[in-house]
Amino acid sequence: MTALFARLRAIYLDKWDRCFNSDQELSAAKFEWSEGLAGMNGDAVKRAIEHCRQNIKWPPSIAEFIDASKIERPVHTPLLPTPPKIKPNKENIERVHKMLQEALNK
């Protein structure tokens, strides 16, 4: 839990620190978060951290963090087509260049 709290502090800086008025409150929060996140796998934690980093301006509650862990990442769609496997000769380089130009002009 210490590592997760360190990550959240790195994201939220003093906003995170202001959530805890004493070391006792910080310890209590770590205990509650440990209980609340029991059974959550590493991928879910990563999804939640990424969601928080990109979408949540203030430190999340346990419930918000759990909800964030359930949000699926959007499927990445490449902006450019994958070029075909070809030998690097002048004709093929010109063909790939033309394909990229066409893709950029769409």
Image (tube, rainbow, N blue to C red):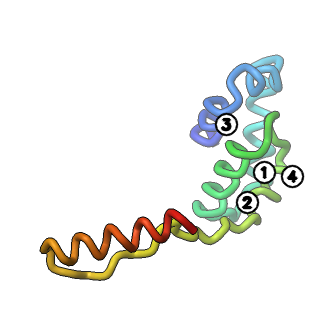
Residue 69 is labelled as 2
Q: Position of residue 29 (x, y in %)?
A: 79, 36
Of 66 and 86, the residue lying toward us: 86
Who's the residue at 67% across and 36% down the image?
8
Relative to 96, is 58 on the left or the right?
A: right
Q: Which mark is residue 65?
A: 1
Q: Which residue has dot 4 on it?
A: 63
- Quadrant in which the N terminus is drawn: top right
What distance separates the C-alpha of mark 2 from that of mark 1? 6 Å
* Tags 4 and 3 touching, CB below 8 Å: no
Could you tell me if the residues under marks 2 and 1 are in contact, i.e. CB atoms within 8 Å? yes
Label 3 and label 2: CA atoms lie apart by: 14 Å
Image spot of residue 84 (x, y percent): 31, 81
Q: Amino acid at mark 1?
A: Phe
* Residues marked 1 and 4 touching at CB (< 8 Å): yes
**Residue 5 place in picture, x, y as percent:** 66, 36
User: Dot 1: few (<14), some (14–19), or many (≥20) neighbours within 10 Å?
Assistant: many
Choose the circle earlier in sequence order: 2 or 4: 4
Give the CA distance from mark 4 to mark 3. Answer: 15 Å
